[in-house]
Image: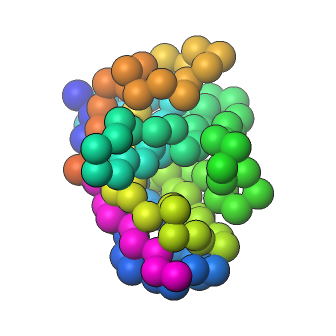
Amino acid sequence: QVQLVESGGGTVQAGDSLRLSCAASGRTSDIETMAWFQQTPGKEREFVAAFNWFSGGTYYADAVKGRFTISRDRAKNTLFMVMNRLKPEDSAIYYCSAARRSDPNMMHAYLYEYWGQGTQVIVSS
């Protein structure tokens, strides 16, 4: 099992920045991909960004390219996401996830076995 704990959400104004963190523990050697998803009321979780734990490759949803940066501290088994130039439409609960696979397309929530509890981001206009 892998446990994921997110932190770093909050309420900010449009144009501000936030950094989300996700600390992984347990069988972290099983992790091949970690990602962030966002969810708003009434909608399914949507892919935001992913990080390939072995290659260091990063993948982003079009809506966040150029504004969000995903990274990791391998020694601390921690995933980060710096969110710059935040917009009101970025408001959501952000979930950290981990998968024991690294398929070419890791944008689908069903590919991830482990999930954190979520951290809320509110961006006011």
Corner quadrant of residue 97: top left
The image position of residue 57, as x and y in percent, is: 70, 35
Image point (55%, 44%), residue name: 48
Magenta segment includes 119: yes
Q: Is residue 82 left or right of residue 44?
A: right
The image position of residue 66, as x and y in percent, is: 76, 57
Report the magenta residues as a range: 118-125
Quick one: 69 or 89, which is closer to the camera?
Answer: 89
Colour setup of the view: rainbow
Q: How many marks?
A: 0
Q: Is residue 47 above or below residue 93?
A: above
The image position of residue 2, as x and y in percent, is: 27, 34
Question: What's the magenta bit mostly, secondary-structure-wise?
Answer: strand
Image point (65%, 58%), residue name: 68
Q: Is residue 60 above or below residue 54?
A: below
Quick one: 71 or 26, which is closer to the camera?
Answer: 71
The image position of residue 42, as x and y in percent, is: 28, 44
Quadrant (top left/top right/bottom left/bottom right) for the N terminus? top left
Magenta segment includes 29: no
Instruction: Evaluate whether residue 86 shows in this view.
Output: yes
Q: Is residue 96 left or right of residue 58?
A: left
Image point (58%, 43%), residue name: 49
In this view, which residue lies farthest toward the right? 66
Instruction: Evaluate whether residue 100 shows in this view.
Output: no
Quick one: 116 or 86, which is closer to the camera?
Answer: 86
Image point (39%, 58%), residue name: 92
